[in-house]
Amino acid sequence: MTAVAQPAAAARRDGSRRDLAGTGALLRLALRRDRVLIPVWVLLLTVLAVQNAAAVEQFYPTAAERAELVASMNANGSMRAVYGPAFSSSLGGLAVWEMLTIGSVLIAIMNMIIVVRHTREEEETGRQELLSAAMVGRRAPLTSALLAAVIANAAVAALVTLGLTGTGLPAGGSLATGLALGGTGLVFASVAALAAQLTESARLAKGLTGAVLGAAFVLRAAGDSGTTDGSSPLAWASPLAWARNVRPFADERLWVLLLSLGLAAAVTAAAYELAGRRDVGASFLATRPGPATGRINGPYGLAWRLQRGSLLGWGTGLALAGLVFGAMAEGAGDLLGDNEQSREIIERMGGASGLTDAFLAAMAGLFGMITAIYAVSAVLRMRGEETSERAEPILAGAVPRLRWAAGHLLLAFAGSAVLLTACGLAMGAGYGLAAGEPGAVWRVTGAVLAQAPAVWALTAVAVLLLGAVPEAAAAAWALVGGALVIGWLGPALDLPRAVMNLTPFTHLPKLPGGDPAAA
């Protein structure tokens, strides 16, 4: 038995080494390609954490003011749905209260981009096939991509810890914050790795990962809206809630990090198993080939065929989220009483026409910013078609370049309006049912549609970048990310008006409740 087992074990070890051959070289290549991308994301998350801590100390300097803010926010289910419950009124507890919500989403997006970029995107462009012709193992690309993500997450955890400690916050809570963000990043790195094995394109892999992220956000929001201590089963079902339930600066519970590590390990193991069972370029969720004639025989039909899945997925997610947040809006101001600080935050987010309308306006603005992500991705799909050389055979025929582009631009501009309409109808229906005001559905839908000019402005900038500097077209993501961070955290941090004016969403009327202005 021993004589037989030893050669078998040796063979397994040799097989594992062959599967991982070339991992080091691929990792160095990935880090070199991401020498700008990763530092920018790490710096963004670090600055977000440090700036939030400084803002809390500036605007709520006394313990009494912080305790009053925590009591009023935790008493409001709508605000808990947006930011989550606050577990401590200390400087550190309030500093990470808002930051962990947006920070967890941002680090999930960072990991999605890194992992898909070095796995499915490499296969889609044909570069991985060239690399695999050398001494590169079957699982080496996946391993190198995950290691690059691990390095990025470790950098975020380390710099956030050092940054918060540098502001004078306790080291234990600072470390818990950094580890909570890093753990969330690992979860979504593994989800992106699994999605890259299942789908046949980078776009679909990102879409599937984004759908998981959206579902996790909705679960967390729905769970936190019902409880003040983060104990809801719905919240615990979301990896985004685990970061908060580590409770930095509030009797830290580091054991919650084991949930993130366990889920990341399980999903990664599934991704590794699938990676060893498929050929380069193949997938487990193959897309059905479309017809070459009939209704999909022109550039507009082709653009629709390529982007209809993305539009449907975004529409479904936004409609569900709108329904949930619309139902939460009823009674948004009932529990705030006379707390001026809390009222000022909500009014800066959505206007001063009443707290319920202010909450609805804030959600309308948020959904507008999220829709801008779809619109920019629809524009940049043209760049993907070019770099993958799928556009070349089309443009070599009788199809003019502008006509080819017009199909994708129609999906970007008109598609974003469709998404806003679906989200507005759903949010209006949720609020109307909860408040007993069926007619509110049209008022809320109009408020969400009012975000279209800002969405189209960012979309137009993406088109300009794609036409003028196609190699730098991806910079449009930085503009969308900046608008999201400023629009979401700026009102709570009371950022200067000059900073708020950098995003086009600031210049829109606060609807419902405000007066529309053509300018």
Image (cartoon, rainbow, N blue to C red):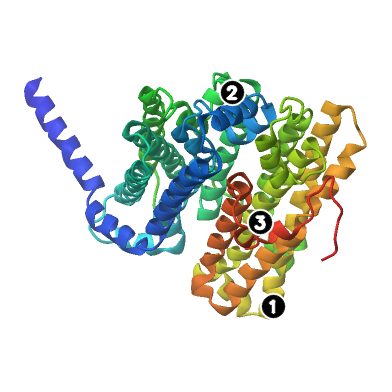
The picture places residue 438, in percent across and down from the top left corner, at 91, 33
The one of 29 and 517 positioned closer to us in this rendering? 517
Rendered image quadrant of residue 307: bottom right
At x 33% / y 58%, what residue is drawn? 30
Q: Along the horizontal axis of the image, is 310 left or right of 88?
A: right
Q: Residue furthest left?
A: 3
Q: Which mark is residue 157?
A: none
Q: CA distance from mark 3 to mark 2?
A: 28 Å
Residue drawn at x 90%, y 31% as measured from the top left: 437
Who comes first in sequence, dot 3 or dot 2? 2
Q: Quadrant of residue 32?
A: bottom left
**Which sits in the foreground, 407 or 298?**
407
Mark 3–mark 1 Cα distance, whole angstroms, equals 22 Å
The N terminus - image quarter: top left
Q: Amino acid at mark 2?
A: Leu
Q: In the rendered image, is residue 191 in sight?
A: yes
- Left or right for 335, reference 221: right
Indicate the secondary structure of the residue bearing disc 3: helix
Looking at marks 3 and 1 on the same chain, the residue that comes earlier in the sequence is marked by 3
The percent coordinates of residue 507 (x first, y second) are 73, 60
- The residue tagged 2 is 234
Of residues 310 and 96, the one nearer the viewer is 96
Q: Amino acid at mark 1?
A: Leu
Instruction: Indicate which label's residue lies in the foreground, 3 or 1.
Output: 3
Residue 372 bears which disc, if any? 3
Percent position of residue 492, x then y: 61, 44
Identity of the amino acid at label 3?
Answer: Ala
Q: Which residue is mark 1?
A: 402
Q: Secondary structure at mark 2?
A: helix
In the image, residue 245 lies at what x, y percent? 47, 26
Q: CA distance from mark 2 to mark 1?
A: 48 Å
